[in-house]
Amino acid sequence: MAHRWKNDLTHDDVTPHAAFLNRRQIMVGIAGAGLATTLGAGQARAATLEPDSFEVITTYNNFYEFGTGKDDPAKNAHMLTTKPWAVTIDGMVDNPGDYSFEDIMSQMTVEERIYRFRCVEAWSMVVPWNGFELADLLNMAGVKSGAKYVAFETLYRPEEMPGQRFRTLDWPYVEGLRLDEAMHPLTIMATGIYGQDIPNQNGAPMRLVVPWKYGFKSIKSVVKITLTDKEPPTSWNKANSREYGFYSNVNPNVDHPRWSQASERTIGGGLFARRKETLMFNGYEDEVASLYEGMDLAKFY
Ligand SMILES: Nc1nc2c(c(=O)[nH]1)N[C@H]1C(S)=C(S)[C@@H](COP(=O)(O)O)O[C@H]1N2
Ligand SMILES: [Mo]
């Protein structure tokens, strides 16, 4: 069974990104000194991951609401106002309603999660998120028995999101998870990077992060969460169902129709960044493979 990541960090422990390199060396040092056994498995593994810089994570983005270029979100996302912000939680829940960002944050425990992040376009980075487990938010709303899926929706506000004036995608951006995927302890709602509020271009004020799935599942700037008994539509599947399925688990053995998924280009490594082999479930196989036991992963891509 998947472990719950025991992390003693709270928002008070946040590390300014300028100091992060230092701390990263400490973390690697701990692992090297053999003390990793006193940490949870996830943390021990995190200690060997090298996060990308704040600069890289916040300037190389996919956020089509602000344009399709990788540098468009960093240029345009300042137009987005994120205060006030509310998330509607509805459908098969005991306590449906509009929850303000502040109300949610007052009830959630924020911790740091250093995760691999793998885009379906075959690039990847390692990101130090701050966030809370989605399960905690869903439990706050009270999931009714019979609910099987969770649907998510991004803000629709073309005045502030210039990309929404073009029909690149059918707006608003929507995503979905099976309920057990949504409840998995690795699935988080991220509200920060490097201990800072999450920048608009990365999905402020709150975005999903599902580290074993291709990046497009990690929907940004969420305004609506709906519990349902039917598999919800998802944006990239609607745009091209042959190329993008509902599950979209990272899988080096199932190629995209137009390119291989066996390896990935690491962003932020500079000129000498080498391609690295893509890992099954993006390296989270021990934690999540049981969710898909007996499923044909080539069919349910
Ligand atoms: N609303 C919304 N969410 C989105 C996207 C988007 O265009 N719109 N792009 C997705 C894709 S393809 C990726 S790879 C990640 C990128 O997240 P990052 O820019 O924080 O690295 O966000 C995902 N979430
Ligand atoms: Mo992506």
Image (cartoon, helix red, strand yellow):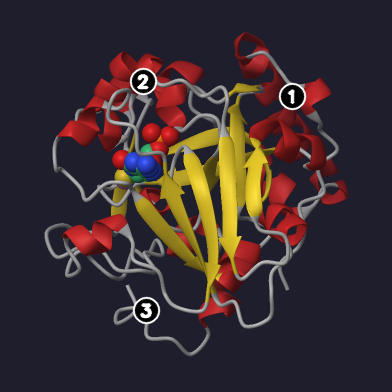
Ligand 1, seen in the image, is in the quarter at top left
Judging by the rendered image, the residue that carries numbered circle 3 is 297
- Mark 2–mark 3 Cα distance, whole angstroms, equals 36 Å
Q: Quadrant of the image for the C terminus?
A: bottom left
Judging by the rendered image, the residue that carries numbered circle 2 is 77
Q: Which amino acid is tagged 3?
A: Leu
- Mark 2–mark 1 Cα distance, whole angstroms, equals 34 Å
Which image quadrant for residue 234?
A: bottom left
Provide residue 214's location: percent of width, then percent of height. 38, 54
Provide residue 96's location: percent of width, then percent of height. 66, 58
Q: Which mark is residue 26?
A: 1
Provide residue 213's location: percent of width, then percent of height. 44, 58
Say if 45 sits above or below 19 in the image.
below
Name the element at disc 3: loop
Q: How many marks?
A: 3
Name the element at disc 2: helix
- Mark 1–mark 3 Cα distance, whole angstroms, equals 39 Å
Callout in the foreground (1, 3)? 3
Question: Which residue does the image show at 34% across and 47% down from the upper left?
Answer: 119
Pick out the residue farthest to the top.
Answer: 18
Q: Is residue 72 left or right of residue 2?
A: left
Callout in the foreground (2, 3)? 2
Q: Which mark is residue 233?
A: none
Question: Which residue does the image show at 31% across and 26% down from the upper left?
Answer: 272
Q: Earlier in the sequence, mark 2 or mark 1?
A: 1
Question: Which residue does the image show at 41% across and 65% down from the upper left?
Answer: 249
- Specify whether tag 1 is near ligand 1 (CB below 8 Å): no
Which image quadrant for residue 189?
A: top right
Say if 33 sits above or below 78 in the image.
below
